[in-house]
Image (cartoon, helix red, strand yellow):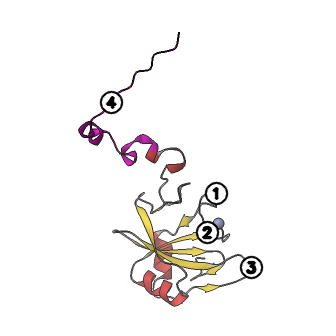
Amino acid sequence: MAKKRRFVRLSLADLAKEPTWSETPRSTSGRHRKTPGTVNAAGQFSDPHGLELRLITRDVTGAVAQRLVDAGALVVVEECGCGAGPGGCTPWWLDDDQLRKLRGGAAPWVTGRNQAPTWIDQWGNDDHVVVFAHGEVCWGGVL
Ligand SMILES: [Zn+2]
């Protein structure tokens, strides 16, 4: 005898009460898990408080990066030039002391020592402006 299947018919009003995907535990677990300050497998990059960041400008000049830091931007670094996307290395964030050393100093420059892909992006959210240094960036004795 075939197994009886039970179908549940939901009205549109009932469906509207169901949680959306982003409200389910799956949206923040597994490859969608958000680890503060890193990029998750879904490609979402978050600040150290776990708030998602948006790419504002790809490939800013050293002078622009320096102006952003002078104005209080945070700095995050990945030194191999992988871009720190899904499967990439784990980026690290400069602490307050390191940021103080950069403010008002010389603009970052590219060392090109090991020919790693090197560039600087500007990211941001409502709370922070973030300078993301990729590859071989030399900056104020900190990087
Ligand atoms: Zn990397």
**Disc on the earlier residue, 1 or 4:** 4
Q: Secondary structure at mark 2?
A: loop
Distance between the alpha carbons at the discs numbered 1 and 4:
41 Å
Q: Residue at x 45, y 16 (%)?
A: 4
Distance between the alpha carbons at the discs numbered 2 and 3:
14 Å
In the image, residue 66 lies in the stretch drawn in magenta: no
Amino acid type of the residue tagged 3 in the rendering: Gln
Q: Secondary structure at mark 3?
A: loop
Query: Of the numbered discs in the image, which one, if any, rests on residue 65?
Result: none
Residue 61 lies in what quarter of the image? bottom right
Tag 2: Cα neighbours inside 10 Å, few (<14), some, or many (≥20)?
many
Q: Which residue is mark 3?
A: 115
In the image, residue 6 lies in the stretch drawn in magenta: yes
Q: Which residue is mark 2?
A: 83
Instruction: Name the quadrant of the C terminus.
Output: bottom right
- Between circles 3 and 4, the one closer to the viewer is 4
Distance between the alpha carbons at the discs numbered 2 and 1:
10 Å
Amino acid type of the residue tagged 1 in the rendering: Gly
Which segment did they paint magenta? 1-26
- Between circles 2 and 3, the one closer to the viewer is 2
